[in-house]
Amino acid sequence: MLDEPTNHVDEATNGRIVAALRDFTGIGIVVSHDVGFIDALAERCVFFERDHVRGRNVTAVRTRPGNYRQAAASAEHDRRSSDAALHQARHEAARLEAVTARRRHEAALASTRAHAVGAAMNRKDHDARNLLKLHKSLSTDGSAGAASARIAAQRDAAKRRTASIVTAAKRYDGDIWMDAEASHRTELIHLDAGVIRYGSDSVVAAGAASGMATDAATGMTTDAATGVATGPASDSPVDAAMDTAVDAAMMGLTIPELSVGPHDRIGLIGDNGTGKSTLCRILLSRLRAAQPAIPTLSIAQNTTDANAREAMRELASLSAADRSAVLSAYAQLNADPDRLLAGGSPSPGELRKLLLCLGARRHPHLIMLDEPTNHLDLHSRQALARALAAFPGTVIVVSHDRAFLRDAGISTFWRCEPRAAVIGDDSGGSGSGSGTILRL
């Protein structure tokens, strides 16, 4: 029995966990929001679903056969069937209500006419008075009255059917960005090819630290101390940087020339320890140094209690209108504003959503998120992906969740790889041990 076994693990580790569990011959129970992981292993899925019935939301537990995509298709079929039944029941109840109202109106008109005839009738005309009494009797106690009673009973039954139909609780999928727009700059970030040393906030040009310089036009490398040219180092700037950054002082992430535009949607992927956070740090430092400043929303992978306290203080300090707008956006990310306002500290997943909605007020041109799906349930992941897909500016996301990246509209991928895997070194090193390289 495993609870969220793929949180904080990279793709390679995820694959090894899947392989190990496939070899297990006993009973496996997994709590997970990782769609790919569930699809690879599950034979049936237990859904905790929010239903709306008789005016309130309740949690229901349902078991469906198959992996997630198969079970989710069954759940969607059930939801559509419920919605169709509700629409039909409401239509029938409205039709019967209209028939009842029309009959009530006709009866009122008939009563008015009868009253007018009775008022004008000669009191001594006994035949006319008896005919009027017969008319009243037939209209209220006869077949017409019985028909009206039947219609009213059918109407009430239709209303009861409408109230008893179970439908999915409301989920929000509106726009949270409050008139956000992309930057008008042609380029938000530019990094020259080189090496980002681990723990550093700067890019060292290829060959600078090792005492080698590479001529961009000829590809010749020159030793700075002797002036001796050694010939073309390699076929590409990335390989040139990798070949020249060979000493221990240069251990870090080797990058090609990078450019980030106003509409780019970049997924930063790779195994843990290969330099993704290092690259994010240097990208953020360039954004903060830009003149004029580039509005940026960045949320780290690991939030703290201090982040939660500051977010709640910011929320409390907003005007009523701004607070309402933030909470509306928060609800659209599959979160409960009432629970947030009830007090206490938000969970890590709730805090991520709140930080995103508070940041949306500042109209960012670029959003950078590090493993944003950690601690989020499946519906929250889907809601966040829709929100990111609708954002008009630049999005950079560090994630191992390929399904989430696809749903968020990520179209460009930057992969951090151990250098050993690239150059064929069988030492098995990765991370700061042998350096890493960024592949586009």
Image (cartoon, grey):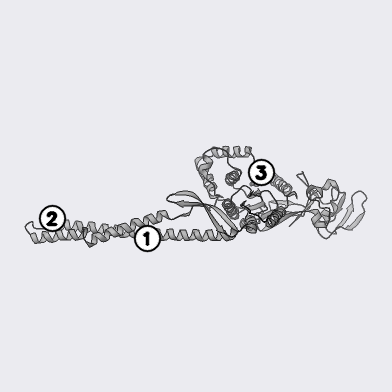
Dot 2 alpha-carbon crowd within 10 angstroms: few under 14, some 14 to 19, many 20 or more: few
Which of these two is toward me, 33 or 211? 33
Indicate left or right for 321 with 213 as reference: left
Q: Secondary structure at mark 1?
A: helix
* Mark 2 vs mark 3: in front: 3
Quadrant (top left, top right, bottom left, bottom right) of the C terminus:
bottom right
Judge from the rendering whether residue 415 lies leftward or rightward of residue 299; answer left or right.
right
> Which residue is at the front of the view, 39 or 170?
39
Q: Is residue 401 left or right of residue 421?
A: left
Q: Position of residue 398 (x, y in %)?
A: 68, 51
C-alpha gap between disc 1 and disc 3: 53 Å
The answer to whether residue 114 of the structure is visible from this angle is yes
| Residue farthest front in this picture | 26
Q: Position of residue 307 (x, y in %)?
A: 62, 39
Q: Which residue is mark 1?
A: 92
Q: Is residue 388 left or right of residue 275?
A: left
Whichever of callouts 1 and 3 sits on the residue coming sooner in the sequence is 1
Q: Position of residue 394 (x, y in %)?
A: 64, 53
Sequence-earlier tag: 2 or 1? 1
Q: Is residue 184 something that shows in the picture?
A: no
SS at badge 3: loop
* Residue designated by label 2: 119
The label nearer to you, 2 versus 1, is 1
| Residue in the picture at 25% in, 60% down | 146
Of the numbered discs in the image, which one, if any, rests on residue 432?
A: none
Kind of residue at disc 1: Glu
Q: Residues within 10 Å of mark 3 (few under 14, many from 20)?
A: few
Residue position for label 3: 302
Q: Are marks 1 and 3 in contact (CB under 8 Å)?
A: no
